[in-house]
Amino acid sequence: MPRNVRGAIPGVPWRIQSMSHHLDTPLAAQSGQLCIEDLDAFNGERGTVFVMDVNSSVTRADIKYGFHAEARYEFKVHFDGAELEELTYRVAFGEPDARGRQTLTLHALTGGEARDDAATGKLLVQGRTGEVASNDVLRIWAGRIMDPFYIDLDQLATVNDAFRNSAKLDRSAWRPENPRNSFAGTTVESIVLEVSRDLSVRGGCLTILTIAPIRAPPLTAPTGRANDQD
């Protein structure tokens, strides 16, 4: 499930190319661990921050928490508008222990290796979910958090209907004093990586391509009508 986002770094041009969302595919309900919910990149305290959220609890009540132990979660960086990535940060997780915590590894792949699924790259840090792992130039944290996504699905349905029917948007039933967040109380698994700005952005236009499942088992699309809510 490739997802692209361009920019989001102060001083660097940006535009969204495409982005996944909660429940944008019926496979999201089958394995939320392999569904990217949100992707962010922004200026942090020490450098550039990359954030990937997966596995939203909005999918269903009995979701399997944690990250997929057979998947690789990657941030692929294209410098100066290059067609191919030159830097990949690859995060992988182990099986959960009795407390649900998982080991994690962060590798960096550069040059041709950044585009090679078989390459291993350089191990940067090792750690566990729920704890910060760091070295002199980066830090990473992964674990479950409250979902920062906000939307009123009733209003989304109103907008979708107007767009689908080429009709005027009617928001007369909505009251600003009674906002509703359809994702209130939901959670996601989040990967937060902050790296030295010198290591992540050399200038020009930054593109991030994330591909969550690489070696994960194939998913089988369910039969019946797809549930496209977002």
Image (tube, rainbow, N blue to C red):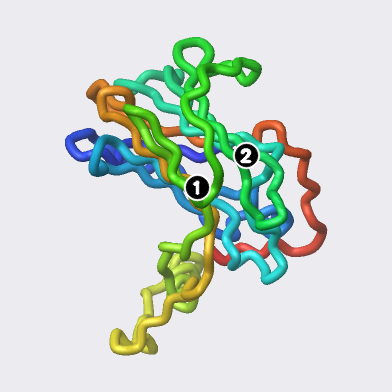
**Side (left or right) of 27 relative to 44:** right
Choose between 2 and 123: the one closer to the eye: 123
| Residue 175 horizontal/vertical position (percent) | 33, 88
Image quadrant holding the N terminus, namely: top right
As helix, strand or loop, the secondary structure at mark 1 comes to strand
In the image, residue 125 above or below residue 83:
below
Of all residues, the one furthest to the front in this rendering is: 98
Q: Amino acid at mark 2?
A: Phe
| Residue 124 horizontal/vertical position (percent) | 47, 25
Is residue 19 at all visible to an observer of this figure? Answer: no
Is residue 70 at all visible to an observer of this figure? Answer: yes
Cα–Cα gap, marks 1 and 2: 10 Å
**Side (left or right) of 100 relative to 45:** right
Choose between 107 and 157: the one closer to the eye: 107
Q: Which residue is mark 1?
A: 142
N-terminal-most mark, 1 or 2? 2
| Residue 27 horizontal/vertical position (percent) | 70, 53
Q: How packed is label 1: few (under 14 Cα within 10 Å), some, or many (20 or more)?
A: many
Choose between 94 and 49: the one closer to the eye: 94
Q: Quadrant of residue 26?
A: bottom right
Rendered residue at 38%/46% (across/down): 40
In the image, residue 149 above or below residue 102:
below
Rendered residue at 50%/36% (across/down): 210
In the image, residue 97 above or below residue 181:
above
Q: Amino acid at mark 1?
A: Ala
Of all residues, the one furthest to the top in this rendering is: 112
- Asked whether the residues under the numbered discs 1 and 2 touch, taking CB atoms below 8 Å apart as contact, a structural biologist would say yes
| Residue 173 horizontal/vertical position (percent) | 39, 89
Rendered residue at 48%/68% (across/down): 160
Q: Which mark is residue 93?
A: 2
Q: Which mark is residue 133?
A: none
